[in-house]
């Protein structure tokens, strides 16, 4: 399979591209010049200013889109050479930091871990823009019920078929890092069929779940304070992210003289 090439004299942009590629574990080749690039290079990521220097048609200006990840997605799309896929399956391993994977016509194109349930819909919107398909299915693992339902409710407005699947035995060996396990579980979930989601799902909170959010707020704030039960409930229902809740309560705390 062809590989992505990276060519730009903009050091800051180069650093951002390489950081994003490494985070997503995407193979690439750094190009010091455009003279006689290796045959395995299928698409070149560059800057908008340097785009004209590259003769090949398959090139993407990484700084011309809303994010580096968006540009990388477009480059991967060009790399496959497909304008339209027959079927796309997007798998989600729910949790506090969900894993997300996309399988296009039986090819695993991406597997990533995102920072929170609210981030899943943003990533999937990006997938839908970059990978057009005749049929698209989103499959979410059945575990972590509160996070699962929050994720599903945020995906319903996308008007894409959503299924809840049995994620038993999808989690790989514990020897791997958590981020890798979650993204690999998402890839396995993408390939499983499940029950179709028909409507908004209830967010059933419990005192234990609220206490767990408060515990997380103490950890994230490095022990400086704990968010209130009311704010923790808003985090559980997806109204606020944990970081937003911490920032909100920190602003309202009385200043020490």
Image (cartoon, rainbow, N blue to C red):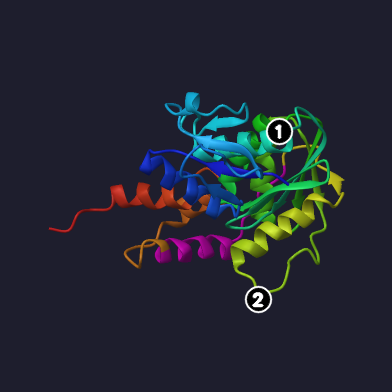
Q: What residue is shown with label 1?
A: 131
Point 72% across, 60% down: residue? 185
Asked if 62 appears above or below 217 in the picture, the reply is above
Q: Quadrant of residue 14?
A: top left
Count neighbours of disc 1 (C-alpha within 10 A) and say few if under 14, some if 14 to 19, many if 20 or more: some
Quarter of the image with the C terminus is bottom left
Q: Secondary structure at mark 2?
A: loop
Q: Are marks 2 and 1 in contact (CB under 8 Å)?
A: no
User: Magenta part mainly helix, strand or loop?
Assistant: helix
Q: Would you say 120 lies left or right of 186 here?
A: left
Residue range (magenta): 201-219
Q: What residue is shown with label 2?
A: 175
Where is residue 156 shown, x and y percent of the image? 71, 35
Point 63% across, 62% down: residue? 180
Is residue 172 visible in the rendered structure shown here? yes
Asked if 130 appears above or below 123 in the picture, the reply is above
Mark 2 to mark 1 CA distance (whole Å): 32 Å
Q: Secondary structure at mark 1?
A: loop
Q: Quadrant of residue 175?
A: bottom right
Q: Quadrant of residue 158?
A: top right
Instruction: Residue at the far left: name it.
Output: 257
Where is residue 154 shown, x and y percent of the image? 64, 39
Which of the labelled discs sits on residue 121, or is there none? none
Q: State which tag comes first along the sequence, 2 or 1.
A: 1
């Amino acid at each position: 399979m062809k590989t992505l090439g990276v060519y730009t004299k903009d050091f800051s942009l180069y650093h951002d591209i390489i950081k994003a590629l490494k985070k997503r574990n995407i193979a690439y080749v750094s190009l010091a010049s455009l003279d006689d690039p290796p045959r395995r290079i299928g698409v070149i990521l560059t800057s908008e200013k340097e785009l004209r220097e590259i003769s090949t048609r398959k090139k993407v200006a990484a700084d011309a889109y809303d994010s580096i990840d968006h540009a990388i997605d477009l480059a991967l799309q060009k790399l496959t050479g497909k304008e339209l896929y027959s079927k796309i399956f997007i798998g989600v391993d729910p949790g506090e930091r969900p894993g997300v994977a996309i399988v296009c016509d039986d090819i695993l194109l991406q597997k990533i871990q995102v920072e929170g349930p609210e981030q899943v819909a943003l990533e999937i919107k990006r997938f839908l823009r970059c990978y057009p398909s005749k049929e698209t299915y989103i499959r979410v693992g059945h575990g972590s019920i509160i996070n699962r339902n929050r994720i599903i409710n945020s995906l319903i407005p996308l008007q894409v078929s959503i299924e809840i699947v049995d994620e038993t035995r999808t989690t790989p060996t514990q020897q791997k890092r958590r981020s890798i396990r979650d993204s690999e579980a998402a890839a396995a979930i993408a390939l499983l069929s499940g029950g179709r989601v028909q409507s908004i799902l209830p967010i059933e909170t419990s005192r234990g779940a609220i206490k767990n959010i408060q515990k997380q707020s103490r950890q994230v704030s490095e022990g400086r304070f704990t968010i209130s039960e009311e704010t923790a409930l808003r985090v559980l229902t997806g109204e606020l992210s944990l970081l937003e809740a911490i920032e909100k309560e920190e602003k309202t705390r009385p200043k020490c003289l």
